[in-house]
Amino acid sequence: MANIKSAKKRILVNRARQARNKSIKSAVKTAIKKVDAAVAAGDQAAAKEALQNAISTMDKAASKGVYHKNTASRKISRMTKAVNAVE
């Protein structure tokens, strides 16, 4: 355990950030799974609705620095392509 006051604070701050990042990543993964499930079921209306939610969630995660903006953009692009392929 750290003895220096600033090191103790860093530990606390890192734990708080880790919890926030974990929550955000979990929300993104859930949104992606909902899009994938709708695409697999062939339900275009549900897929489009889930895609809008997923895009919003991923953009927020990228803006907070949880995901790199290019990573979020790549994932959004692939999901959009999959949803557009559903007939």
Image (cartoon, rainbow, N blue to C red):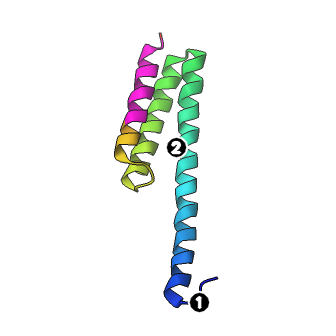
What predominant SS class does the magenta segment belong to? helix
* Image position of 44 (left or right of 73): right
Q: Which mark is residue 82?
A: none
Instruction: Please identify, in this view, whether the residue under mark 2 or under mark 1 is nearer the observer.
Output: 1
Q: Quadrant of the N terminus?
A: bottom right
Q: For the magenta stretch, what is the residue range? A: 74-86
Residue plotted at (51% across, 77% down): 10
* Residue 77 falls within the magenta-colored stretch: yes
Residue at point 38% right, 34% down?
74
Q: Residues within 10 Å of mark 2 (few under 14, many from 20)?
A: many
For disc 2, the marked residue is 28
Furthest residue in direction right, as rendered? 1
Q: Is residue 37 above or below residue 72?
A: above
Residue at mark 1: 3
- Earlier residue among tags 2 and 1: 1
Instruction: Give the left or right position of residue 62, taking residue 6 as reference.
Output: left
Which quarter of the figure has residue 85? top left
In the image, residue 82 lies at what x, y percent? Answer: 46, 20
Q: Position of residue 48 (x, y in %)?
A: 46, 25
Above or below, 51 relative to 56: above
Q: Residue 75 falls in which quadrant of the image?
A: top left
Label 1: state its secondary structure.
loop
Residue positioned 53% across, 29% down in the render: 35
12 lies above or below 20: below
Report the Cα–Cα distance between label 2 and label 1.
37 Å
**Contact check, label 2 and label 1, Cβ < 8 Å:** no
Q: Position of residue 62 (x, y in %)?
A: 39, 49
Q: Residues within 10 Å of mark 1 (few under 14, many from 20)?
A: few
Q: Residue at x 48, y 14 (%)?
A: 86
Secondary structure state at the residue bearing disc 2? helix
